[in-house]
């Protein structure tokens, strides 16, 4: 199906989906999609500011801490999972996420639109933008607090801080990719500022009291994100979101994920879902660890960036312990050998 744009009145656009049996030339379809996207408020076709276009021409992401690298096999292995709550901390985190999810779905009319089939491309982009502004907070807060904790106690952190900062940066990149599709208005921006102020204050206090609860909370939050992006991909494949199916991936997404020029927006959403899946597993893993226990989980975002994984992941701790054990064994053997020699050298009475 191809979207055809008609102007029924000055300043009013009407998008009609034409059946595939109609003969539409390739050049006409290339014109139709940008026009339809522009009428639906997608900033990728609205021209944007001259400064933004100039900055996009010089897009360079070498300064990033991390960069995602997924293979086709990795994407095919992504699945929706759920970790059952095992104690009161897990249940508190799970029901907190469910309460926030229900409130947001009702306030954003997501549940009603999803049931009635009214979730359009612009609705999905607004939802993604708002949720990514929240998702980028936990990793930065946790990384900052653990950084200060390491400074106060004057000891190493053993691999937590880098992984948490990588998560925060990755979520911020998701937001920037979504913003290349649509620029929110002042009301939306005010809602983001208010929501961030409340969530930042609450999460900071919660992490100071119980880090395990917070990591479990993020793990369950990422489970919901995987469900959301899976639903989005299902709607695209079902033909409910033709713009997402045919739009080219934004340049920022192509550079960040190292995608080819002909990559589609659907490919980007599939990669973002894989990122969220990794964050889900990482935070559940953090919640299972003690706060002072080394992080030995190799985080996917760091595999292609850091050359020496052992230095940053905490695996060096295991190596140190192994060397210490070997030294102890050697000293013990040396002591036994020396005692035997001394016993043999003494004259018998």
Image (tube, rainbow, N blue to C red):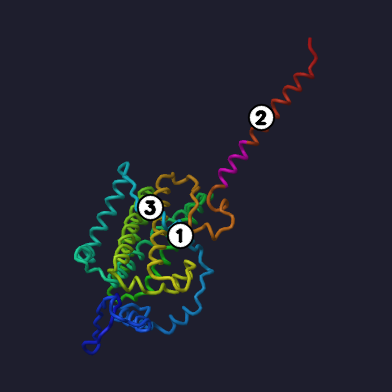
Q: Position of residue 148 (x, y in %)?
A: 47, 55
Picture layout, residue 296 above or below residue 277:
above
Q: Which residues are magenta?
A: 316-325
Distance from disc 2 to disc 1, alpha carbons, whole Å, reads 52 Å
Quadrant into which the N terminus falls: bottom left
- N-terminal of the pair, mark 1 or mark 3, is 1
Q: Nearer the viewer, residue 14 or 67?
A: 14
Q: Is residue 47 within the magenta segment?
A: no
Q: Position of residue 198 (x, y in %)?
A: 31, 62
Q: Give the residue drawn at x 44%, y 63%.
A: 170
Q: Secondary structure at mark 3?
A: helix
Distance from disc 2 to disc 3, alpha carbons, whole Å, reads 45 Å
Q: Is residue 122 visible?
A: yes
Picture layout, residue 309 above or below residue 293:
below
Picture layout, residue 57 above or below residue 82:
below
Reading the image, the residue beneath label 1 is 72
Which-is-in-front pick, marks 1 and 3? Answer: 1
Is 291 displayed left or right of 220 in the figure? right
Q: Is residue 147 visible?
A: no
- N-terminal of the pair, mark 2 or mark 3, is 3
- N-terminal of the pair, mark 2 or mark 1, is 1
Check residue 207 in the rendering and tell me which mark sits there, or answer none: 3
Check residue 332 in the rendering and tell me which mark sits there, or answer none: 2
């Amino acid at each position: 199906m191809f979207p055809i744009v008609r102007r029924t009145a000055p300043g009013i656009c009407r998008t009609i989906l034409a059946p595939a049996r109609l003969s539409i030339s390739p050049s006409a379809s290339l014109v139709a999609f940008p026009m339809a996207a522009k009428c639906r408020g997608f900033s990728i076709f609205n021209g944007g500011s001259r400064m933004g276009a100039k900055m996009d021409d010089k897009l360079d992401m070498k300064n990033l801490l991390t960069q995602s690298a997924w293979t086709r096999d990795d994407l095919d292995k992504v699945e929706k999972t759920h970790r059952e709550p095992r104690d009161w901390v897990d249940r508190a985190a799970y029901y907190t996420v469910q309460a926030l999810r229900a409130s947001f779905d009702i306030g954003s009319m997501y549940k009603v639109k999803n049931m009635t089939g009214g979730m359009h491309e612009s609705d999905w982009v607004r939802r993604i933008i708002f949720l990514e502004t929240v998702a980028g907070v936990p990793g930065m807060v946790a990384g900052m607090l653990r950084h200060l904790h390491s400074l106060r106690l004057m000891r190493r952190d053993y691999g937590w801080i880098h992984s948490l900062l990588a998560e925060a940066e990755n979520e911020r990149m998701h937001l920037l990719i979504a913003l290349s599709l649509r620029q929110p208005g002042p009301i939306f921006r005010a809602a983001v500022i208010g929501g961030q102020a409340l969530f930042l204050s609450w999460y900071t206090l919660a992490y100071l009291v119980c880090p395990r609860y917070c990591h479990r909370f993020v793990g369950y939050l990422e489970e919901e994100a995987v469900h959301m992006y899976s639903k989005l991909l299902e709607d695209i494949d079902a033909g409910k979101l033709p713009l997402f199916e045919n739009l080219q991936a934004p340049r920022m997404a192509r550079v960040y994920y190292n995608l080819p020029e002909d990559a589609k927006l659907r490919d980007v959403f599939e990669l973002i879902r894989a990122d969220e899946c990794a964050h889900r597993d990482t935070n559940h893993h953090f919640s299972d660890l003690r706060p002072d226990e080394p992080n030995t989980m190799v985080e996917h975002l760091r595999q292609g960036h850091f050359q020496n994984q052992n230095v940053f992941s905490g695996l060096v701790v295991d190596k140190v312990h192994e060397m210490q054990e070997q030294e102890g064994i050697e000293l013990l053997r040396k002591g036994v050998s020396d005692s035997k020699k001394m016993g043999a050298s003494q004259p018998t009475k």
